């Protein structure tokens, strides 16, 4: 099924229009309420078969998608790389063809290679949703981040948002960068120069080498990226201790700001490394709201890609009442 | 193979371009006993001569490619010496040089002799073997250059891999002097390039793919130039891709260091933007870089800082490229598109004249590797390795029609102008369109 508005697949935000992004956020609004009900289920995707194809370990994203699918009444199957034919050397294209042969409707894919979701989407008729491909994009994470910022600040346009940390290896950062700039936010990235990718300044963002500079810039939001512990082994940073000392988001650093700064993190957090516990658990943290919104955003994406119309999202939701 | 090799052949009324003697004039070329008998206007043919009217066409020395990968032995499903020679003939090449990264590696006399024999059996475009620099291309011990040269090797290279050890590169350059052969290096500093799949820049950042910085090439180019200066050896730099490399080579040549270099048609015409959409047919090593690099490479080829064009023909089975970008192998085929891509972009594009292009695809490469039997010239008495080109032929790239066993090209569907219509090796027609 092709969505009249979103097309067949959701592989990234880079090539989406601001209108498409806003539509997803607006469609997520009515779905938020479903998760607050005693019986968390609407019939919007009844009879649809969805495969969650996870070539990389994931807890949060996989569970969030699974909840979204189940709350829309879809039938779901989880395929993990370990224990499946994938671990026996089957190629991505063969995996795709076999899934297709089983007549499924949608695939949610996470894969370690950038471009894997697009690769799959170009080869199967089912809708493909990117749940993270290599260092490329993680569009539903950025969408839930946008929704959470909008909830907190009432707008996105004109806000100053800084992505802090390992931008080089972060698909969350890339998707956020596209989504935020398309919706009119001012975007900065900040981190050690070893973890900032070449050419990032040409993408319309401000680049800072220190967290202090981002705070002086007047950031409204810091989205703190997870530091993969293997970065130290690969020589990008000398130690986690020093990373925390120089780049950690701490209350002491945030105090330099005259205004409260909203704190986000895509999880899972390394407390005491990229983020201080007092900040993560503090009054301006919206980290758990991000998780809650993840389910609603993914419901909206699934619903729209299945051909659902935005203006009917409310009705689709009420169908169960 | 045609019987016409037994009879004299007169190519009549064409535009004769011979960069080796600065000739660009209308005329005839007479071929007799596998050699060029005469070049001039209104040549009379002896009895029994086959006469071919080539008016409107270009008669030139056969094209020479210093850098191809034929997959025999080891991966004969992707290419063999014979299928590679067939593809080369179709592309207008009369001589090609086969890199030694076969399986097993072409690192000894017997393996070199095998390529020579397979080439002889095919009886098409000449295939000159390149021997490995190090045994097994492991970068540890020198292979037997002397034995390989006596079996027919024209150069040594560990291409596919860089020579990581500067000591090994030094000894290779020194030792190769005895045999008068160049040492061809794949310039890539391995720790900078590790894990990279495309050029490091804005596009790799957007695609989330690990980049290979230009410095990975430039560092090794600089090292090789210094070692050539130290040793007095001849270093040949394979497939140059970065503008910084051009600057280093330019300076080295000005200082009289014995360095030569090649560039591929794709590095002269494509940029890293071709990797967008994760097109694995744009994945090659060195990677496609930026438009400023393309401009620098074109300028360097024009003024001779880069000596010649080489295809880096690298066949891969279709399903190997049908993979995520990270997982696909590097390389594309090029023998059947090299001339047309270069002609369309550089000559029709107004950057090069046709004689300049032929010089960079025939005369210069033949000179750089001192190919046995000559090539690169239409001088009377020289071996009759000749190509007849139709510079106005318009065609569209369809890999299904390739003679190569592999179809991995980024130029599928591209309309091109210019094509070889007749390829002659030692007086024998090996390809006719």
Image (spheres, coloured by chain):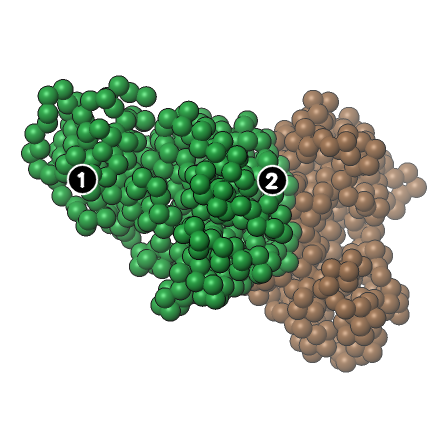
Report which quarter residue B35 is drawn in: top left
Image quarter where the C terminus of chain B lies is: top left
**Which disc, if any, is residue B328?**
2
Image x and y of residue B390, in percent: 24, 34
Residue sitting nearer the eye, A210 or A238: A238
Residue A249 visible (yes or no)? no
Left or right: where does residue A200 sit relative to residue A215?
A: left
* Residue occupying image coordinates x 73% and y 51%: A141
Picture colour for chain A: brown
Label 2 resides on the chain identified as: B
Residue A95 visible (yes or no)? yes
Report which quarter residue A313 is drawn in: top right
User: What chain is the green one?
Assistant: B
Q: CA distance from mark 1 to mark 2?
A: 48 Å
Q: Is residue B406 above or below residue B105?
A: above
Residue sitting nearer the eye, B276 or B31: B31
User: How many numbered markers are drawn?
Assistant: 2
Label 1 resides on the chain identified as: B
Q: Is residue A237 above or below residue A303?
A: below
* Residue occupying image coordinates x 19% and y 49%: B21
* Mark 2 secondary-structure assignment: loop
> Mark 1 sits on what residue?
B380
Image quarter where the N terminus of chain B lies is: top left
């Amino acid at each position: 099924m092709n969505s009249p508005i979103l097309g067949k697949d959701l592989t990234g935000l880079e090539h989406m229009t601001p209108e498409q992004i806003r539509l997803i956020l607006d469609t997520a609004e009515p779905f938020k309420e479903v998760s607050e009900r005693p019986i968390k289920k609407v019939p919007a995707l009844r009879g649809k078969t969805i495969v969650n194809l996870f070539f990389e370990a994931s807890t949060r994203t996989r569970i969030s998608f699974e909840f979204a699918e189940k709350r829309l009444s879809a039938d779901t199957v989880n395929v993990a790389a370990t224990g499946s034919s994938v671990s026996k050397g089957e190629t991505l294209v063969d995996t795709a063809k076999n899934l297709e042969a089983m007549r499924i409707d949608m695939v949610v894919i996470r894969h370690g290679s950038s471009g894997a979701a697009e690769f799959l989407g170009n080869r199967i008729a089912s809708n493909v949703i990117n749940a993270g491909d290599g260092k490329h994009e993680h569009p539903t994470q950025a969408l839930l981040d946008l929704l959470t910022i909008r909830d907190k600040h009432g707008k996105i346009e004109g806000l100053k948002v800084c992505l802090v940390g390992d931008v080089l290896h972060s698909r969350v950062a890339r998707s956020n960068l596209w989504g935020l700039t398309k919706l009119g936010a001012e975007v900065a990235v900040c981190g050690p120069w070893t973890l900032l990718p070449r050419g990032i300044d040409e993408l319309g963002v401000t680049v800072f080498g220190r967290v202090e500079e981002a705070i002086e810039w007047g950031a409204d939001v810091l989205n703190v990226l997870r530091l993969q512990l293997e970065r130290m082994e690969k020589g990008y940073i000398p130690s986690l201790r020093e990373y925390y000392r120089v780049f950690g988001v701490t209350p002491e650093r945030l105090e330099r700001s005259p205004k409260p700064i909203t704190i986000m993190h895509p999880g899972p957090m390394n407390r005491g490394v990229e983020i201080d516990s007092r900040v993560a658990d503090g009054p301006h943290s919206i980290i758990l709201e991000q998780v809650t919104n993840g389910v609603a955003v993914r419901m909206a994406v699934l619903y729209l890609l299945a051909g659902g119309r935005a203006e009917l999202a409310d009705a689709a939701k009420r169908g169960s009442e | 193979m045609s019987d016409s090799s037994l009879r004299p052949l007169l190519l009549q009324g064409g535009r004769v371009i011979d960069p080796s003697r600065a000739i660009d004039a209308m005329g005839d070329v007479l071929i007799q006993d596998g050699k060029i008998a005469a070049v001039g206007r209104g040549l009379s043919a002896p009895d029994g001569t086959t006469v071919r009217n080539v008016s409107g066409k270009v008669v030139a020395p056969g094209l020479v490619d210093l850098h191809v990968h034929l997959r025999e032995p080891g991966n004969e499903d992707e290419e063999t010496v014979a299928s590679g020679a067939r593809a080369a003939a179709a592309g207008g090449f009369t001589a090609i040089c086969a890199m030694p990264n076969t399986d097993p590696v072409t690192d000894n006399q017997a393996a070199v002799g095998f390529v020579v024999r397979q080439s002889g059996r095919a009886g098409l475009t000449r295939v000159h073997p390149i021997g490995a620099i190090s045994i097994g291309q492991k970068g540890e011990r020198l292979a037997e250059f002397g034995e390989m040269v006596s079996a027919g090797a024209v150069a040594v290279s560990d291409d596919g891999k860089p020579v990581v050890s500067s000591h090994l590169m030094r000894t290779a350059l020194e030792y190769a002097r005895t045999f008068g052969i160049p040492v061809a290096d794949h310039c890539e500093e391995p720790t900078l390039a590790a894990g990279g799949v495309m050029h490091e820049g804005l596009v790799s950042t957007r695609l989330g793919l690990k980049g290979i910085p230009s410095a990975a090439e430039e560092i090794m180019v600089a090292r090789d130039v210094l070692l050539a200066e130290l040793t007095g050896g001849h270093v040949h730099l394979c497939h140059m891709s970065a503008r910084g490399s051009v600057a280093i080579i330019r300076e080295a040549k000005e200082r009289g260091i014995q360095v030569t270099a090649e560039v591929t048609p794709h590095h002269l015409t494509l940029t890293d933007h071709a990797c967008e959409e994760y097109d694995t047919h744009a994945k090659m090593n060195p990677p496609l870089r930026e438009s400023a690099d393309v401009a620098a490479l074109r300028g360097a080829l024009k003024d001779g800082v880069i000596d010649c064009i080489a295809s880096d023909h690298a066949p891969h089975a279709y399903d190997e490229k049908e993979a995520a970008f990270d997982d696909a192998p590097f390389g594309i085929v090029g023998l059947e598109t090299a001339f047309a891509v270069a002609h369309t972009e550089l000559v029709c594009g107004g950057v090069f004249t046709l004689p300049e292009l032929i010089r960079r695809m025939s005369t210069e490469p033949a000179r750089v590797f001192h190919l046995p039997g000559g090539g690169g010239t239409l001088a009377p008495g020289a071996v009759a390795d000749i190509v007849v080109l139709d510079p106005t032929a318009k065609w569209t790239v369809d890999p299904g029609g390739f003679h190569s066993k592999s179809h991995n090209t980024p130029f599928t569907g591209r309309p091109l102008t210019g094509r070889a219509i007749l390829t002659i090796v030692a007086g024998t027609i090996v390809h006719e369109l």
